[in-house]
Image (cartoon, rainbow, N blue to C red):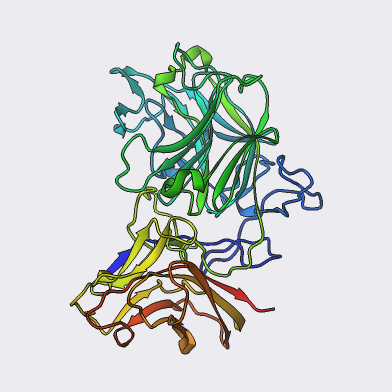
Amino acid sequence: MKMYIKNITYLLFLGMITLANFSCNQKAVAQAKVDMTKQVNPASDPTNTGGWILNEEVSDEFEGTTIDQNKWFIEGQNDDYYIWKGRPPSQFAAHNVIVEDGKLKLRTQWEPNFKFAKENYADGNNNDRYGEWEGKPFPVTTAGVITKKRFLNGYMEAKTKTGNAAITGAFWAIGYEQELDIFEQMGNPKGEKLDIKANGTKITIHDWSPPAKRPTWVWKYKNNNLPFRTADEFHVFGVEWGKDYLKYYMDGKLVSEITQDELGVEWVLNNPMEVWLDSEIFKWLGLPNKEELPVDFEIDYVRIWQQPDDNLLARQFYGFEGPILYEENPRPLKLLPESSIPDEYQKFWLIDTLSAKYFVINKGDYASGVNSLEFSGFGKGEQLETEKVVAMSPEGAINLPAGTYKLSCKIYLEQGHLTKKLHLGIKEENIKFEIDLTNQPRREWITVERTFTKKLNSTDTDQFSIEVQKKDVPKNRPCKFYLDDIEIRKVK
């Protein structure tokens, strides 16, 4: 029997100069409708001093007459819904997704003839029915779209205007065990004690790691004193999502920021995310009435930039943060952020039952992110119960063409008795890396590097292995070390 250990994600850049983003066994698809003869830079960095490169797979200018379904999943299209059907009493409807005048318009309208789902949606303390309010018909439909691709770190920007009603406009993103609400706004909320006002915006980081108990937010910034109503005019909102920080911008101006140092292990933004655009009813901010509708949440563009990275591995997977993604396979419609169930879309490290006594994902001891792979599990007078402790990546988690490469990883050796060697490997061509741990510094992260040559291109079955052998472990004496940030780069 094999046990799946929760681990990491994937990196989208395969080279310093490529504009295509890849996950394992994935080819670049769907190009954004951006005139690339003209340089398009972030509002936060108009001269592009950061060297940003537009990720065309998750950016859109919304030209033409229909949304690009190579890029976007439409909630309710063909009666398919991803994760949920919207926030009751409203429900997502595909016909409310409109592209015209160079904009995406997510419409909210009063539709008595719409066939609402005969079900409730439970959300925290709420358990409301679609199309009804307090037992009476409330036929309001809204809209939502989600990018089909995910990305890891970058600058996310949208130019938007909310609908002038008690309905939200939201620009947000989710990934494995994480959520980032770049903004939640409402054009015309109702009530006295309002969390979001007509001239307000809110950004929130949510932690969906189990047990995902509400409130799930770990950080938020709210401004209800903007010098404009969000339903009156277009404004630009963006976040720079770094490896260990987040910066929030409005109209190109920095207004708030947070770092991993401030949040510690509650820094959850460690895995690739997909972008959401939608409208919802927040009943605690009032309900839209028939006379207010229809209204549109308008999006002039969504643009995602990233910075070059020549690491050829799925960075977050090999940093032990979450699953590796196989985006050439369909994303399950019920894939929740907190789900650690392996499927054809997301896969985890493979560790057999006996090895799982000694290899565990440690949260809190890390070189980066919040996790590392820990080797431990036996104490004084005990012996290793297996000839070797092994963690294997899923098949296809190594995707390298023939060439010469440099592998690097970070290791932290605890004080006390020492494991003599660590063995890493690439299954195809039987490439092995024997790392001598003796005479290395203790209680600090060290970087180990190895150069190797791959004579053949990887196939869909190539795997990466991490191994500790019994002969290298002290008898009857405990030992412990941590492994993090395995990377591979091409030698030029």
Locate residue 398, reporting x and y percent. Answer: 49, 74
In the visual, does 37 lie left or right of 117?
A: right
Query: Which residue lies most toward the right here?
Result: 37
* Residue lying at 70% horizontally and 41% vertically, measured from the top left: 44
In the visual, does 135 lie left or right of 284?
A: left
Q: How many marks?
A: 0
* Residue lying at 37% horizontally and 30% vertically, measured from the top left: 115
Quarter of the picture holding the C terminus: bottom right
Locate residue 225, reporting x and y percent. Answer: 59, 19
Locate residue 1, reporting x and y percent. Answer: 23, 73
In the visual, does 248 lie left or right of 437?
A: right
Q: Say which of 196 and 116 sits in front.
A: 196
Q: Residue 377 sits in which quadrant?
A: bottom left
Q: Say which of 257 and 390 sits in front.
A: 257
Locate residue 310, reporting x and y percent. Answer: 63, 67
In the picture shown, does residue 329 fall above or below 61? below
In the picture shown, does residue 364 fall above or below 405? above
Query: Which residue lies most toward the left here?
Result: 381
Judge whether residue 400 can be spotted in this image: no
Judge whether residue 355 can be spotted in this image: yes
In the visual, does 2 lie left or right of 285?
A: left
Q: Residue 127 sits in which quadrant?
A: top left
